[in-house]
Image (tube, grey):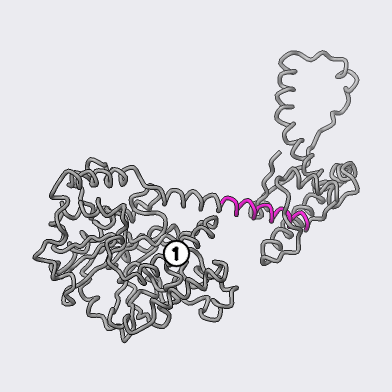
Amino acid sequence: MKFYISAAGIKRVTISSPGGAIGKGGGGCAAARRFPGRTLILFLLMLAIVLPFIFVRFAFLVLESASVCDSPLDCMGLRLFRGGDTSLKIREELTRALVEETSQDGNGRGQKGSLDSFDELVKEMTLKRRDIKTFASVTKKMMERKVQSAKHHELLYWHLASHGVPKCLHCLSLRLTEEYSVNAMARTRLPPPESVSRLTDPSFHHVVILTDNVLAASVVISSTVQNAVNPDKFVFHIVTDKKTYTPMHAWFAINSALSPVVEVKGLHQYDWPQEVNVRVKEMLEIHRMIWRRHYQNLKDSDNSFIEVVQRDLSSLWETDLNGNVVGAVVDSWCGSNCCPGRKYKDYFNFSHPLISSNLLQDECAWLSGMNVFDLKAWRQTNITEAYSTWLRLSVSSGLQLWQPGALPPSLLAFKGLTQPLDPSWHVAGLGSRSVKPPEEILKSAAVLHFSGPAKPWLEISNPKVRSYWYTYVNSSNIFIRKCKIMN
């Protein structure tokens, strides 16, 4: 038997007393009569209708006997001869007890909910004669455990869905890799020789994109160029990993008209000094350790660079950072100190003294993904060393300082060096279920950031927000069509 109780609905439960009329006279004659077939069928039909109600009523009597009656038979006697007063009392007490348990904080007075089903709970109540408050407490804990289990499974499915590579994107990478090997144009130098000088010219607007997703990089650059007043002022630097370098290079070599200057480099192509290589390798390994340690938590900590640009970004390069290193959106579109899901307490373990002594729980974390950096100011600070130090402290503290992701140690390293930008520059969290900005906010934002697991090319994404992203997908491209990216 499975039985579910709702605190909200229990006030609507009604238990009616079974009534029966005793006929006047004719009792002896009736006993001697023979019933015709039609009467017998009618009697059986009525019995089939009434029996379920009798069964439910008996179940309630058993439940009541566990708390107010000396035995089930006593309780049945009370109910038969005293009417519905006992039922009303039980219902009121149970409702009150459930409300009291629900209104308590996490330190409820009831027992630990270790029972797995309502059958076990009824048996426990009957055998050990528990009172109404104990019943309410155990029931509440059972429901909470079921809800937590359901949330965990939902989070697990979202995690698996968001980290899987859709067939269409896998197809795109394979076809571009093949094109790189057979088509000389796909191996053309990026950028062309006449534009190489722009890569280090500070008079241009330099945009750095860190991604291993060809389609995402193409959308970011396409949307930036289409909405720029002067697109020739932009220089794009794409940094990717070794496995994605070939299809990424092939895409922008074949589609060079999308932007005047695009540089594609894999991490393996950077000629860093040995000291820097060792430090980068150490940082990456510590991040992998943190992910492995916290993998079971499955937090939505996906900070992939998946964005859409909807208006000209040129004025960002004229922003006065007031001596700070990074410009970022801190407040949200919903107002000052409104940052649901991204306060420091959402990233860090404040039970650890290293965290609680350096940060405030309710302070808003700045948004990563669309940031302006003053590289000259950066070189005058020890941010890189501070970042490495915090990673090492995380290891020595048992990887308990923060949740997985690159943002938590960045928040610590850039602490006190961030210049707030107007919230309209950057609306994030569009890959999350909890963030639902109004339509006018989405249309007016400079950059839409699909942070969170529901990336726009996945079926779990919000169709309403997905349309903003697909506007800038090159649907006429032969590889997009063959891989059915737009389907």
Q: Is residue 78 above or below residue 236?
A: above
> What is the residue that sits farthest to the front in this orientation?
274
Q: Foreground: 461 or 213?
A: 213
Q: Residue at x 79, y 46 (%)?
A: 63
Magenta-span inclusion, residue 357: no
Q: Main secondary structure of the magenta part?
A: helix
- What's the magenta region? 134-150
Residue 40 point in image, percent of width and height: 75, 18
Residue 351 point in image, percent of width and height: 60, 73
Q: Is residue 4 above or below residue 189?
A: above
Magenta-span inclusion, residue 144: yes
Q: Is residue 51 above or below residue 237?
A: above
Q: Is residue 73 above or below residue 356?
A: above
Give the crowd class for mark 1: few <14, some 14-19, many >=20 residues within 10 Å: some
Amino acid type assigned to the residue bearing label 1 in the image: Gly
Q: Foreground: 274 or 14?
A: 274
Is residue 137 rendered to the left or right of residue 431?
right
